[in-house]
Amino acid sequence: MDENALNKLRYPIGTYKAPEIITTEHINAWIKIIEDHPQKLRQLVDGLSDEQLDTPYRPDGWTVRQVVHHLPDSHLNSYIRFKWTLTEDIPTIKAYHEDRWAKLSDSLGPVDSALNLLQAVHVKWVIVLKSLSAEDLKRSFIHPESGREITLERNIGIYAWHCDHHYAHIENLIKEKGW
C-alpha cells in the first residue's frame, strides 16, 4: 500500500488543525461532539461480531476492539489533565504509551466495558467543560513529549477531533467491508 493511501487510512478526517481564533461557537460545537460521542460510538459498533471487532482498521493498525478500548483510556487521561490544569498552575501532565496500553489484556476484552467507561467519563467531563469560564479556557498545561504549553480551549478541540478521528476509522472499515 502506498504512503498516500496509508495516510488516508491513518487520518481519515485529516490531522487536527486548531482555528487561529477559538470562538465560543467552536467550544460549544466541540463540547457537543464530546457529549454525543459515547452513544454515537455504541450505535456504530453495536452488533459487530468478535471477528469484526478483531479486524484492524488499516494494515498494521489497531483492531476495532482496541480502538474502542483506547477511547476511554485516552479520554480519562484527558479528563484528569483538565482537572490538573484547573487546580494547578501550568502543570506538566503525565504522558502515557497508548500503543502499549492497547496491547494490555483489558483492551482485548468485551467492548461493552469500554463503552460504559467512555459514557461515564464523558458525562463527568462534559459537566466540567460546560462550566468553564473564559478565564478557565485560557489555562494551560505542558505536554512533556513536545514541551509545548496547551490551553484547555485548544485541548477541547483536539479531543473533539479525536472522537471524530477514531469514529471515522471504524465507520470507514464498516463501509469498506459492507458490514
Image (cartoon, rainbow, N blue to C red):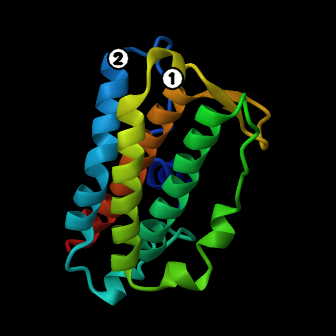
Q: Is residue 172 left or right of residue 11?
A: left
Dot 2 amino acid type: Thr
User: Looking at the picture, how far across and down is residue 114, in whole percent?
Assistant: 41, 72
Residue with the mark numbered 2: 24
Q: Is residue 46 left or right of residue 31?
A: left
Q: Position of residue 50 (x, y in %)?
A: 34, 88
Above or below 85: residue 164: below
Query: Pointer 1: what residue?
Result: 137
Left or right: residue 24 versus residue 102 is left
Numbered badge on residue 97:
none
Q: Nearer the viewer, residue 26 or 117?
A: 117
Residue at the spot 58% in from the left edge and 72% down from the top edge: 102
Q: From mark 2 to mark 1, how far is it between C-alphas?
A: 10 Å
Q: Residues within 10 Å of mark 1 (few under 14, many from 20)?
A: some
Q: Is residue 174 left or right of residue 114?
A: left
Q: Is residue 57 visible?
A: no
* Residue 77 against residue 25 in the figure, above or below: below
